[in-house]
Image (cartoon, rainbow, N blue to C red):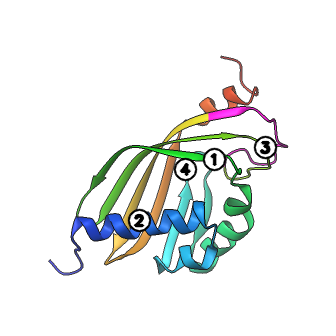
Amino acid sequence: MAGLFPHDVLGRVWEAHVTHEFVERDVEATLATMTDDTSVTIVPLSIGGQGKEGVRVFYRDVLIPGIPDDMRTTPLSRTVGDRYVVDELRFSFTHSRRMDWILPGLAPTHRRVDLPHVVVVEFRGDKVLAERVYWDQATVLRQVGLLKA
């Protein structure tokens, strides 16, 4: 079928994307892994960006400046199909800076957060077409003290 790539190619592109985004914190390198009509949706908060310019603004102004220095990502599982990569991961971090992509408008609480989440990544060819990120927001709110168990 036209447009399908071997699973290892999609996995490598996704790994490069995540490295540019969370390790290097390089907006333009991250965007280079994406289609022009890409989209990013942080589902629990209904935020993100549409199109390369919208995603650029989201990454530059919201996501990347809001990544704590001690953020660690632990892979739990990965499923790769002909057009999709689905990762199950854990983020762990100290809420040491404003993180409008997880806790919009909240000043740092300096509490630890351990957050299981799932990322569904859709590809067109060897570029990211859409990224949808899911987690349980109540888990985050409990861990920073905003929701009683």
Real-space Cα separation, disc 2 to disc 1, in angstroms: 19 Å
Q: Secondary structure at mark 2?
A: helix
Residue labelled with disc 3: 96
Q: Secondary structure at mark 1?
A: loop
Query: Vertically, is 135 above or below 22?
Result: above
Query: Vertically, is 125 above or below 113?
Result: below
**Which one is closest to the eye, mark 4 or mark 2?**
2
Whether residue 86 sits left or right of residue 103 in the image: it is left
Tell me which residue sits at (51%, 69%) in the image: 39
Real-space Cα separation, disc 4 to disc 1, in angstroms: 20 Å
**Which one is closest to the eye, mark 4 or mark 3?**
3
Residue labelled with disc 2: 14
The question of residue 98 being in magenta is answered with: no
Real-space Cα separation, disc 4 to disc 2, in angstroms: 19 Å
Q: Earlier in the sequence, mark 4 or mark 2?
A: 2
Q: Amino acid at mark 3?
A: Ser
Which segment is the magenta one? 102-113
Tell me which residue sits at (58%, 65%) in the image: 21
Please state the horizontal and vertical placement of residue 29, each as a whole percent of the image.
56, 78
Real-space Cα separation, disc 4 to disc 3, in angstroms: 23 Å
Tell me which residue sits at (71%, 50%) in the image: 68
Residue labelled with disc 1: 71
Whether residue 97 sits left or right of residue 33 in the image: it is right
Q: Are marks 4 and 3 in contact (CB under 8 Å)?
A: no
Q: Are marks 4 and 2 in contact (CB under 8 Å)?
A: no
Q: Earlier in the sequence, mark 4 or mark 1?
A: 4
Q: Earlier in the sequence, mark 3 or mark 2?
A: 2
